[in-house]
Amino acid sequence: MKLFNTLTLFSLLLSIGCSKTTDNSLPNVYVSYRDALSSPKLNKLSSAGNAVLIDGYGIAGLLLYKRVTDGVIVAYDRCSTVNPDKRCAVTIDNNNVTVTDPCSQAKFNLEDGQPSKAPATLGLKRYSVYTTQFEIVVSN
């Protein structure tokens, strides 16, 4: 009987541990990006309301945006939270206010990363940003 209870408990724990998650959360990946604010690729960040895409970091690249509301630079992972296993990288819309997931057509607001059009229900993954007078550091 003791063996039966042990096997039953083990089977239950195994089935719970192997269940597929459907929360659309993104995996944690190490991010450490550093660049000079005077770098030509970051030139657009000198004005509020502009965004820059950086490849090679995070899950699907980084999206840096200088908010209109307070002039602060924020960083998001470009990977859409809609079906994150597809790793669809959001693209900047012409209005520089939203980004679109090309796979699902979901939209996200750049000021706060939150969804602005279905089927998105979770906001973009955000990273920490530290700026000095001369450089920017994005990390987690």
Image (cartoon, rainbow, N blue to C red):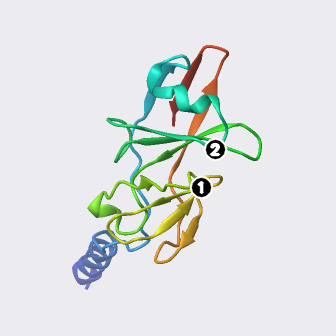
Q: Residue at x 27, y 73 (%)?
A: 10
Q: Position of residue 86 (x, y in %)?
A: 27, 62
Q: Position of residue 63 (x, y in %)?
A: 47, 43
Q: Is residue 124 above or below residue 67?
A: below
Q: Residue at x 52, y 31 (%)?
A: 138
Q: Position of residue 105 (x, y in %)?
A: 40, 71
Work out whether residue 20 or residue 7 is closer to the camera in this orientation and state it.
20
Q: Is residue 31 above or below residue 102?
A: above
Decide: few, some or many residues near mark 1? Use Cα within 10 Å; few <14, some 14-19, many ≥20.
some
Q: Residue at x 31, y 79 (%)?
A: 12
Distance from label 1 to label 2 (Cα)?
A: 7 Å
The residue labelled by disc 2 is 49
Disc 1 on helix, strand or loop? loop
Is residue 52 shown left or right of residue 15? right
Is residue 15 shown left or right of residue 95? left
Decide: few, some or many residues near mark 2? Use Cα within 10 Å; few <14, some 14-19, many ≥20.
some
For the view shown, which residue lies furthest in the top direction? 134
Which quadrant of the figure contains the N terminus?
bottom left
The residue labelled by disc 1 is 97
Q: Are marks 1 and 2 in contact (CB under 8 Å)?
A: yes
Q: Residue at x 32, y 77 (%)?
A: 9
Q: Amino acid at mark 2?
A: Gly
Which picture quadrant has residue 5? bottom left
Disc 2 on helix, strand or loop? loop
Q: Position of residue 100 (x, y in %)?
A: 44, 62
Q: Amino acid at mark 1?
A: Val
